[in-house]
């Protein structure tokens, strides 16, 4: 099966006219995909929109997409549809591998190796120091004295600022009599508005 190449003038206005302003460009792209899927007889997932075509739809912002676009569409043997603005060639997107993860892994390995070497170096230095101290004292081999580790300071517990008391029930509300009528406040009198005088016509 050979590649199929066609040129379409895709109407987008009917697709986005009833959508809210802040979604019009998204709806235009969806309308474009639906149109190409219907005319090229494929699923919407297999439709790929080119960089220049996408920039043309989004050029005037999300609120004002173009009413129609002229596109060149190519369907390959695998059933993938690639659309690009008329006059431009579809460019495959370049996928760059992230080198950051590989570098981090290498850094982690180096850090672990350096930790192991530092621990070994520390042990060797301690042995040398023990040997030098023993030679100076002249007492032969003696167990090295361990330095007392600094103790962590403990925070004193805060004294309770308010002693806990038993909860008391709020005072009971007075019960109103059933026969009693509610008391109404006297209404304040508002000053009366003066009627507007009509101008006499002569």
Image (cartoon, rainbow, N blue to C red):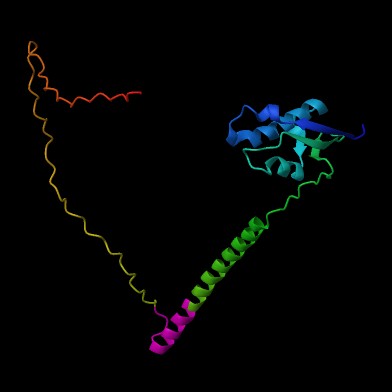
Residue drawn at the location 62% of the way across and 26% of the way down: 18
Residue 138 appears in the figure: no
By secondary structure, the bulk of the magenta-drawn segment is best described as helix
117, 27: nearer the viewer: 27
Residue 28: x %, y % from top left: 68, 33
Residue 71: x %, y % from top left: 81, 37
Question: Outermost residue toward the front?
Answer: 202
36, 194: nearer the viewer: 194
Q: Which of the 4 image quadrants contains residue 188?
A: top left
Residue drawn at the location 69% of the way across and 32% of the way down: 30
Residue 19: x %, y % from top left: 61, 29
Q: Quadrant of the N terminus?
A: top right
The answer to whether 101 is drawn above or below residue 174 in the figure is below
Q: Is residue 89 magenta?
A: no
The answer to whether 150 is drawn above or below residue 96 in the figure is below
Question: As drawn, is 8 to the left or to the right of 159?
Answer: right
Question: As drawn, is 191 to the left or to the right of 151?
Answer: left
Residue 59: x %, y % from top left: 69, 44
The answer to whether 95 is drawn above or below residue 154 in the figure is above
15, 173: nearer the viewer: 15
Question: As drawn, is 104 to the left or to the right of 132?
Answer: right
Residue 105 appears in the figure: yes
Q: Quadrant of the C terminus?
A: top left
Q: Which of the 4 image quadrants contains residue 72?
A: top right
Q: Is residue 128 magenta?
A: yes
The answer to whether 161 is drawn above or below residue 135 in the figure is above
Q: Which of the 4 image quadrants contains residue 35?
A: top right
Residue drawn at the location 81% of the way across and 35% of the way down: 80
Question: Outermost residue toward the right?
Answer: 2
The residue range painted magenta reads 126-142
């Amino acid at each position: 099966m050979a590649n199929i190449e066609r040129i379409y003038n895709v109407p987008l206005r009917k697709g986005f006219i009833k959508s809210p302003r802040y979604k019009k460009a998204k709806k235009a792209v969806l309308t474009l995909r639906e149109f190409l899927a219907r005319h090229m007889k494929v699923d919407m997932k297999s439709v790929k929109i080119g960089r220049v075509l996408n920039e043309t739809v989004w050029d005037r912002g999300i609120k004002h997409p173009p009413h129609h676009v002229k596109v060149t569409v190519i369907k390959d043997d695998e059933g993938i549809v690639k659309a690009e603005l008329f006059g431009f060639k579809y460019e495959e997107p370049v996928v760059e591998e992230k080198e950051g993860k590989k570098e981090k892994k290498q850094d982690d390995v180096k850090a672990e190796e350096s930790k192991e070497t530092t621990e070994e170096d520390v042990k060797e230095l301690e042995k040398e120091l023990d040997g030098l101290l023993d030679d100076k004292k002249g007492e032969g081999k003696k167990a090295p004295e361990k330095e007392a580790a600094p103790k962590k300071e403990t925070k004193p517990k805060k004294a309770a600022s308010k002693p806990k008391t038993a909860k008391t029930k709020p005072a009971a509300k007075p019960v109103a009599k059933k026969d009693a009528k509610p008391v109404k406040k006297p209404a304040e009198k508002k000053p009366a508005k003066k009627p507007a005088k009509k101008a006499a016509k002569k």
